[in-house]
Image: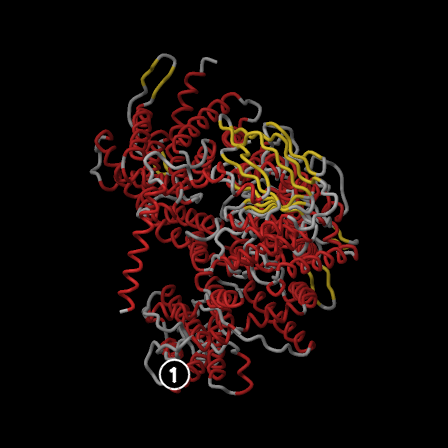
């Protein structure tokens, strides 16, 4: 029982990572009613992008504290590029097709991205090590917080606040809301819905990149398959929170993360099942 | 009537290449013949490239494909010339058929030459014969580009897009008088034989390059036949003789094991059948009722595990042995029950939520089964190691595990299972066709189209959705039984949502959508392709899944209604390209009448 | 105009007009909003009843209470004496069919298939029967098809039976919707704005059709905005405003009711031009018209 606070915190941290990814799912779904199965891979490419910056671009031995912002930017550039390209070439032509065609395309995109990284990124056939913060965590009462977690603690709420402000206060944000509610009317009102869709993809990708970096920091490694499971769970979170609702997505993520953490610890007789079972049982 | 209006209205564009028509036609015919002839030359020095292309005077391996393409091009070119009996080859009178065949020939020839160069290291590996072939293949293409393109008048689009639209154009042919019945049946038989031959050839390709070349040729060839209007005519003929076609198709399929001298490729055939049958089951759920089930493969797993448990395997926790038909039934029933259990709470959910939940249940099945190993759960399914050493079943006293000879042919283990699976496939096809063309099928489609309206028509939405779900599950379970026995064991691992090895739910869904939802042959073709492509493209090694993913994207981009489209879906997807003449004409008529 | 009205209102009615559909004291609340307040309405056999009212008056909500889509918060709706089941498909089975305001055809099915789906409740061939294809099944299918073609003939769409319904022109799509609803052999047909978007000829054709339907013995309840259509069609009209039934009676009565007029056209506001000013403006306009037409003649 004394583990409870720690597990809760772990759960919240895990959950906010899921939430960041879930936001991307929910934004795209809210605007074009597409379940972007490839979004998990966008998360993955964001992580790899950040890794690239650190390993190949910055001089060896750069302190992680300095490198981190650059890595985030690098990760975002990659993930946004991937998202925008897939939107432009894979999804946009199928805008008016019944929902199964874009779904299959998304599966194809997901597979392609996974394989591209696996085949072409140096050393990606196994996990790649991700730079870590040194030092042990510091303690807050019964809870230990790793340096890696601090990043998430800062980044996640910040991102949500940014998004909320963006959607509610800016012109583009309102245009996005309009497009989500009724694309045809929005177009008639003079909103460039194509641009809005691209922006939605981009924001989702940026958030996924942040999640990717935090994943790398937390677990110390990235591999080409990490997008798949994380994507699945994030999608569950998005649905949980009400698909199309960005705040719900984050909330759903948090709930899922906590549930998973607690379930892993407390469901003893089928521990193997907890990791996914926790997520999926939630739905029913 | 509207057809003739279309053809008189559509003016003729300038051709892409400004050459006189007679020259163009001559080029096609001569070029086609040249290309075919070049197949007889040797294309490379060494036999390091598979298929032995080093011999002058005899085509080998991929050269046969070039030969076929060249011959077809020349023949169609002759047909275009107006030679009497050959007119029937191109009922639509469209020049895109020749263009496609020519391009197909070019593609496969250059692919071969390119593969030789890449694999052996440089163009220097091509002999003079190879160079001749490469150039000869260009000739018919040039000729075909010189043919006039039919297109809508007054369109100021570039020639490139006019050409593209011309190729994509759905041919419009006047309905012809049906031939005498025996002639039509002969045609059907001939087509089936050719189909069987192609299928066998495709499965038997020993090396990946040949398979790719084969695919290229088949794709362009089929497209050309489609443009020429032949596929439409074939559909009309088969529609008139449905039962004959069905029986013929199964006879052709049953003949497949006899065409194999070894059992090596028959195993692929059985797997294709299993995959295809399961896809057909999914077609009921997704294609007819419109329920997005992402965890479908779990039903295959339930059937497989159930069959394994009652097979008398030593590791099975149930120590009973069922005869084959009882095992099959049990598997189907178990899956159906599973389907009901899953469906009852979830089918009340909206479409996208249903997707997630079915996905979840699919994974739960796999993980649960993996954990019922005595350590983390009761030992029912043997955990990650599954249930190995499943004995072969006996059908009417014939042990399917042993080879038997029938009329001089040897049927090995896989051939036996192939025939058994064929029986199940026949059952599934029967169920599918009868269900879809009935009150039930109509109700399913109505629910898929507009559930609220369907409810207003008195259809109990929930009950019918559950029916579709359970039926689909049961059919998959049937297939599971064969899979279990054939593979000697069942393990939880393959039953996932997406992975590199079919069948998994994502691939199944792709097979259904790719092949064409709501049709019978669609998922069969889709499954065959989706199974064969990753299996055959081994030479791509690392890149095979990559190619597969890209292929999915491209296929959805360019033909979202699937390869074999039901009439409805084609209209659904290509509505923008349909001439609006019909509706405006009628509107004019109604106004005049009123 | 008046003569046509009186003709229709004195049209021969069946001797005993039994009440088929009866809504008594229906109240529909959504949370804090009361959409329908205490509405009574009856539709008897052989009647054509109209339901009018400005948008937002609660007509569609009330309509949905009659079709099982909503269960009234208070009050009840009965059909032939039995309370309506709470599921739309059961209501259809009981004998009430409806059309939709925005056409909801099964666009990717043919015209005939649409009507066959409408026939769903009156056939009962299940999956086993379909799989076995026994003589019973074949007979049922043939009967269904014959009946469907009869109905298509009745509405005038028989020639287009194999067309994809999405390819029909608008007016014919509406007809198909009605045909589909008729296929359920209803006792009462509910039409939701059947002439929306139609030109006068199409409207007249629809009117003829509704009369023909009534003559088949099916009672009809129509929601409409086209006043001419309603008043020349219906035996009785009810007007709903803000959830309440304002008035009900023969078309003549309802048409001249001041509350109805003001509900649709609004009451004059303070400072609005009085009748003298209106007359002045009209005179001035007439003079201007005269002047311009003189110019044109030159």
Does residue B15 sit above or below A224 in this rendering? Answer: below
Percent x, y of residue A224: 39, 42
Colour pattern: secondary structure
Helix, strand or loop for disc 1: helix
Does residue B237 sit above or below C11 in this rendering? Answer: below
Does residue B166 sit above or below A224 in this rendering? Answer: below
- Is residue C163 among the parts visible in the rendering? yes
Of B344 and C154, the residue lying toward us: C154
Q: Is residue B324 left or right of residue C57?
A: right
Estimate how packed mark 1 is, as few (under 14), some (14 to 19) or many (20 or more) residues with alpha carbons within 10 Å. many
Of C268 and B387, the residue lying toward us: C268
* Quadrant of the image occupied by residue C132: bottom right
Q: Is residue B32 left or right of residue B390?
A: left
Percent x, y of residue B527: 56, 55
Percent x, y of residue B74: 47, 81
Percent x, y of residue A101: 47, 52
Does residue B180 sit above or below A15 in this rendering? Answer: below
Of C244 and C3, the residue lying toward us: C3
Q: Is residue B308 left or right of residue B384?
A: right
Residue behind mark 1: B24
Chain assignment, label 1? B
């Amino acid at each position: 029982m004394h583990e409870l606070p720690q597990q809760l915190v772990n759960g919240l941290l895990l959950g906010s990572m899921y939430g960041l990814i879930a936001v991307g799912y929910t934004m795209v779904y809210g605007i074009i009613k597409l379940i972007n199965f490839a979004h998990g891979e966008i998360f993955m490419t964001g992580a790899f992008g950040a890794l690239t910056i650190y390993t190949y671009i910055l001089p060896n031995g750069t302190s992680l504290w300095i490198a981190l912002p650059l890595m985030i930017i690098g990760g975002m550039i990659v993930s946004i590029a991937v998202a925008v390209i897939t939107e432009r070439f894979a999804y946009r032509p199928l805008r008016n097709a019944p929902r199964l065609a874009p779904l299959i395309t998304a599966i194809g995109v997901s597979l392609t991205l996974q394989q591209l990284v696996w085949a072409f990124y140096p050393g990606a056939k196994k996990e790649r090590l991700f730079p870590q913060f040194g030092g042990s965590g510091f303690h807050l009462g019964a809870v230990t917080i790793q340096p890696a977690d601090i990043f998430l603690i800062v980044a996640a709420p910040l991102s949500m606040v940014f998004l909320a402000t963006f959607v509610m206060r800016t012109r583009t944000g309102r245009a996005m809301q309009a497009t989500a509610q009724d694309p045809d009317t929005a177009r008639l009102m003079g909103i460039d819905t194509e641009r809005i869709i691209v922006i939605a993809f981009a924001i989702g990708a940026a958030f996924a990149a942040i999640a990717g970096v935090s994943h790398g920091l937390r677990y110390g490694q990235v591999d080409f398959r990490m997008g798949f499971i994380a994507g699945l769970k994030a999608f569950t979170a998005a649905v949980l929170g009400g698909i199309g609702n960005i705040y719900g997505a984050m909330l759903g993520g948090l709930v899922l993360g906590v549930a998973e953490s607690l379930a892993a610890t407390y469901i003893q007789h089928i521990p193997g099942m907890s990791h996914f079972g926790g997520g999926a049982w939630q739905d029913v | 009537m509207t057809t003739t209006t279309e053809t008189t209205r559509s003016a003729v564009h300038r051709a892409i290449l400004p050459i006189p028509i007679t020259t163009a036609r001559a080029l096609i015919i001569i070029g086609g013949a040249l290309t075919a002839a070049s197949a007889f030359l040797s294309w490379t020095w060494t036999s390091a490239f598979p298929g032995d292309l080093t011999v002058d005077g005899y085509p080998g391996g991929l050269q046969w494909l070039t030969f076929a393409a060249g011959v077809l091009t020349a023949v169609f070119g002759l047909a275009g010339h107006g030679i009497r009996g050959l007119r029937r080859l191109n009922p639509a009178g469209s020049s895109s058929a020749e263009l496609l065949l020519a391009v197909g020939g070019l593609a496969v020839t250059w692919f071969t030459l390119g593969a030789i160069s890449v694999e052996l290291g440089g163009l220097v590996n091509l002999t003079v014969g190879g160079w001749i072939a490469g150039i000869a293949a260009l000739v018919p293409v040039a000729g075909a580009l010189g043919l006039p393109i039919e297109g809508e008048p007054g369109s100021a689009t570039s020639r490139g897009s006019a050409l593209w639209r011309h190729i994509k154009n759905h041919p419009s042919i006047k309905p012809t008088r049906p031939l005498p019945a025996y002639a039509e049946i002969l045609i059907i038989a001939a087509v089936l034989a050719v189909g069987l031959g192609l299928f066998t050839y495709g499965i038997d390709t020993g090396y990946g390059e040949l398979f790719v070349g084969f695919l290229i040729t088949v794709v362009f060839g089929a497209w050309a036949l489609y443009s020429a209007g032949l596929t439409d005519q074939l559909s009309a003929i088969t529609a008139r003789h449905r039962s004959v076609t069905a029986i013929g198709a199964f006879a052709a399929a049953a003949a497949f094991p006899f065409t194999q001298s070894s059992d090596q490729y028959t195993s692929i055939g059985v797997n294709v059948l299993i995959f295809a049958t399961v896809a057909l089951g999914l077609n009921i759920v997704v294609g007819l009722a419109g329920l997005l089930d992402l965890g479908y493969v779990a039903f295959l797993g339930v059937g497989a595990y159930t069959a394994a448990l009652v097979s008398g395997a030593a590791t099975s926790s149930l120590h009973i042995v069922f005869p084959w038909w009882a095992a099959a039934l049990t598997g189907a029933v178990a899956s159906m029950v599973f389907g009901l259990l899953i469906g009852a709470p979830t089918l009340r959910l909206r479409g996208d939520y249903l997707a997630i939940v079915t996905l979840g249940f699919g994974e739960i099945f796999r993980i649960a089964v993996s954990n019922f190993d005595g350590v983390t759960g009761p030992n029912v399914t043997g955990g990650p190691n599954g249930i190995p050493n499943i004995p072969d079943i006996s059908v009417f006293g014939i042990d399917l595990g042993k080879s038997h000879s029938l009329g001089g042919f040897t049927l090995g283990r896989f051939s036996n299972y192939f025939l058994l699976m064929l029986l199940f496939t026949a059952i599934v096809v029967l169920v599918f066709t009868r269900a879809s063309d009935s009150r039930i099928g109509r109700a399913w489609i109505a629910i898929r189209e507009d559930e609220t309206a369907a409810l207003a028509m008195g259809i109990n939405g929930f009950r019918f959705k559950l029916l579709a779900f359970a039926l689909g599950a049961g059919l998959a379970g049937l297939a599971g039984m064969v899979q279990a026995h054939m593979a000697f064991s069942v393990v939880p691992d393959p039953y996932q949502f997406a992975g590199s090895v079919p069948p998994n739910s994502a691939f199944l869904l792709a097979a259904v959508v790719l092949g064409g939802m709501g049709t019978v042959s669609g998922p069969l073709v889709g499954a065959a392709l989706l199974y064969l492509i990753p299996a055959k493209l081994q030479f791509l090694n690392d890149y095979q899944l990559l190619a597969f993913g890209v292929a999915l994207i491209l296929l959805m981009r360019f033909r979202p209604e699937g390869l074999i489209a039901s009439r409805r879906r084609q209209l659904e997807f290509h509505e923008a390209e349909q001439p609006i003449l019909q509706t405006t004409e009628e509107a004019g008529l109604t106004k005049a009448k009123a | 105009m008046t003569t046509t009205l009186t003709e229709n209102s004195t049209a021969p009615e069946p001797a005993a007009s039994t009440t088929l559909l009866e809504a008594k004291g229906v109240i529909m609340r959504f949370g804090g909003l009361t959409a329908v307040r205490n509405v009574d309405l009856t539709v008897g056999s052989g009647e054509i009843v109209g339901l009018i009212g400005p948008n937002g008056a609660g007509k569609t909500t009330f309509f949905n209470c009659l079709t099982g889509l909503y269960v009234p918060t208070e009050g009840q709706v009965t059909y032939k004496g039995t309370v309506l089941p709470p599921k739309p498909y059961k209501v259809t089975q009981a004998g009430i069919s409806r059309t939709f305001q925005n056409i909801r055809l099964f666009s990717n099915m043919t015209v005939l298939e649409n009507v066959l789906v409408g026939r769903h409740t009156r056939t009962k061939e299940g999956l086993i029967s379909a799989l076995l294809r026994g003589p019973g099944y074949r007979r049922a299918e043939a009967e269904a098809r014959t009946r469907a073609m009869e109905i298509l003939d009745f509405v005038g769409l028989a020639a287009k039976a194999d067309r994809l319904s999405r390819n029909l022109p608008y007016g014919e799509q509406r007809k198909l919707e009605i045909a589909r609803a008729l296929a359920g052999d209803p006792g009462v047909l509910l039409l939701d704005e059947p002439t929306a978007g139609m030109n006068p000829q199409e409207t007249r054709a629809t009117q003829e059709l509704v009369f023909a339907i009534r003559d088949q013995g099916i009672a009809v309840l129509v929601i409409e905005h086209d006043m001419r259509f309603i008043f020349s069609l219906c035996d009785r009209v009810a007007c709903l405003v803000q959830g309440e039934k304002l008035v009900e009676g023969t078309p003549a009565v309802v048409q001249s009711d001041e509350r109805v007029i003001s509900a649709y056209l609004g009451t004059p506001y303070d400072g609005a031009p009085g009748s003298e000013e209106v007359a002045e403006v009209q005179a001035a306009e007439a003079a201007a018209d005269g002047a311009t037409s003189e110019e044109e003649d030159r």
